[in-house]
Amino acid sequence: MQLIRGLHNTQPYLSGCALTIGNFDGVHLGHQAILRHLRQKANELNLPMAVMLFEPQPREYFMGDKAPARLMRLRDKLHYLAQAGVDVVIVAKFDRTFADLPAEQFIEDWLVRKLNVKFLSIGDDFKFGAKRLGNFAMLQQAGKQFGFEVEDSRTFCLDELRISSTAIREALAKDDLQHAQNLLGKPYRIFGRVIHGNKLGRTIGFPTANVRLHRQVNPVKGVYAVKVRLKSGEIFDGVANMGKRPTINGTIQLLEVHLFDFSQNIYGQMVEVEFCHKIRDEIKFPSFEALKAQIEQDVKTAKAFFAKSNYIEI
């Protein structure tokens, strides 16, 4: 899969493509249906299949810290887009210059001249360009003018509920991991690199792998039974805490994972953490002894969950 970061100069990047545009946060079942259809159209037209993403996501640019939690960072999206058979991903830098770009200029400079779009699949509620003046009707008109087909990528539903990244965030906020999985088409997972922490866990008998998050707003919080896939492909059960660690007056979000029956050195490795079952919310304990006693109970709860549920995903 080819990755294009920004479209800085005026030369054409592609000799034609079948394109869709969006955040693709979570690459959920609705996204997957759009991508399958686009793959089919690209094959019919003998064109590369392209996806345009924005970094940061537009809401993150306009809302800053108040933006909704991401389901996935860019690296994770690229992993799942490659799985879906995407040929080219264009990552457009969403900044003031881009936000102020007139809709007509976005169509002519980006879609027509740089990407040479021949087929565009887009939601009929898509707004773009300065002051969000660009819309589906404008794209249809431009398609007639510049010779590309525009198709409405219809909203996909599950049991009459619209599949959206917002619905998934709401399910995760309510600790309804099963409903989130139903909408995602896969369990909720976070990818990250194991980094050195302050190693407090090992002093109370529960060494943890600290996973770098690259973000301070996360859609899950608390203590979970998890499965972790290592770079080697090995999978281990464990218990994880996502939060700020109030017992030691922590201030930044961390994902700490204690793996059962594990003694390997995995510093620097990329791991995949799958959230299987919510055990409890994060709380501040009066002492390390109280924290240790609770972690012992969390481990028992997680092991009992895996023993009883025959959980086999990842």
Image: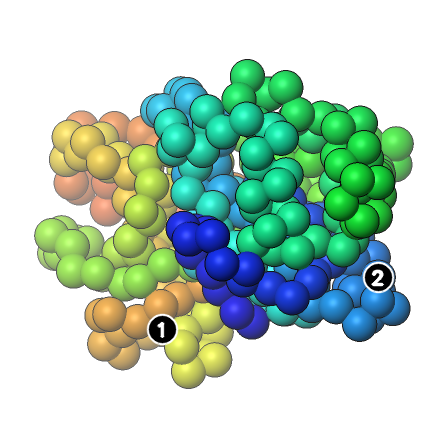
Residue at x 40%, y 50% (from the top left corner): 8
Of residues 21 and 266, the one nearer the viewer is: 21
Percent position of residue 157, x then y: 84, 38
Residue at x 27%, y 73% (from the top left corner): 266
Q: Is residue 206 above or below residue 171?
A: below
Discs 2, 1 touching: Cβ within 8 Å:
no
* Residue 22 appears in the figure: no
Of residues 131 and 216, the one nearer the viewer is: 131
Q: Is residue 31 above or below residue 259?
A: above
Q: Assess disc 2: are there few (<14), some (14-19) or many (≥20) residues with their C-alpha within 10 Å of its C-alpha.
A: some
* Residue 199 appears in the figure: yes
Quadrant for the C terminus, please: bottom right
Instruction: Provide the residue designation for mark 2.
Output: 41
Of residues 42 and 30, the one nearer the viewer is: 42
Instruction: Provide the residue designation for mark 1.
Output: 261
In the picture, the disc for residue 67 is none
Q: Is residue 243 above or below residue 194?
A: above
Give the amino acid at mark 2.
Lys
Residue at x 24%, y 70% (from the top left corner): 268
Residue farthest toward the bottom in the current orientation of the protein: 232
Count all numbered tags in the image, as a single digit: 2
Percent position of residue 262, x then y: 32, 74
Q: In whole angstroms, how far apart are the C-alphas of marks 2 and 1?
A: 48 Å
